[in-house]
Amino acid sequence: MKALPKIKSKEIEKAEDDSWDFLYVFLNEYFEMIDKNKDIMKEFNDFQHTLLAYCYLDSQVCNGGFIQLIQNGYGGYIFNNPFSDAIKSWGAEETAKIVEAAKVIYKKHKEKLETETSLDEFSELYSDIKDFEPLEDEYYKIKEQEVEKVKKYVEEHINDFGIIE
């Protein structure tokens, strides 16, 4: 596969002790590939897309919640794809439940959430749409255990994520 990056086994070994460090060995390669050629994502396999979506979900939800995730353009990538089914099959069942619940809220408020906003309008979204808050609280509680499951899945299916040298 053209879009599978070459990953040095030494890099994987160095990152073994921290789940996110381990995942970023792959994700950093993906980001570099995307920076060079945005269209390369069309050549990513489902495993790569799921890992990217998981990264976007975590970074956005932890920095500004689901509203930020959607406002930054990742709503469709997370909610209009089989991400929750895929992440569930990887063992991250709690993450999948949260994403499914968030998807209902996303669909209900999609037009408002995806409208380009000023900073003030963006801030107002948090007052107007509080439905995500319990899901974000739950995500913070489960994220550490869930990332361990994602790491384990990637380790067990490593050749779907990169060519190990």
Image (cartoon, rainbow, N blue to C red):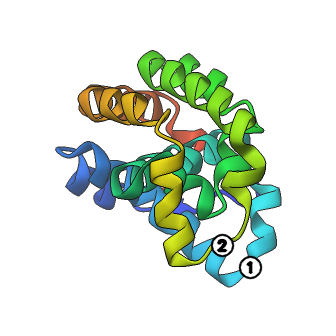
Q: Quadrant of residue 59?
A: bottom left
Asked if disc 1 and disc 2 are in contact, CB closer than 8 Å, the reply is yes
- Circle 2 packing at 10 Å, graded few (<14), some (14-19), many (20+), is some
Image-based side of 136 in relation to 97, left or right: left
Q: Nearer the viewer, residue 4 or 19?
A: 19
Q: Please state if 40 lies on the left or on the right of 119 as rendered.
A: right
Near-viewer residue (96 or 51): 96
- Three-letter amino acid code at disc 2? Ile
Q: Residue drawn at (53%, 55%), measured in percent from left and top?
A: 125
Task: Give the percent coordinates (x, y) of residue 77.
Answer: 70, 48
Quarter-of-image position of residue 3:
bottom right
- The residue singled out by tag 1 in the image is 37
> Percent position (x, y) of residue 66?
50, 46
Q: Residue 50 at what x, y percent from top left?
A: 61, 40
Q: Is residue 76 visible?
A: yes
Residue plotted at (57% across, 31% down): 102
* Vertical placement of residue 86 versus 93, above or below: below
Q: Position of residue 9 (x, y in %)?
A: 36, 55
Q: Residue at the spot x=74%, y=45% of the render?
A: 110
Residue 68 against residue 145 in the figure, above or below: below
Q: Left or right: where does residue 13 sit relative to residue 110?
A: left
Residue type marked 1: Asn
Residue 163 in view of the camera: no
Q: Secondary structure at mark 1?
A: loop
User: What residue sits right under mark 2 in the picture?
Assistant: 34
Q: Which residue in the rendered view is the most extreme toward the bottom?
A: 36
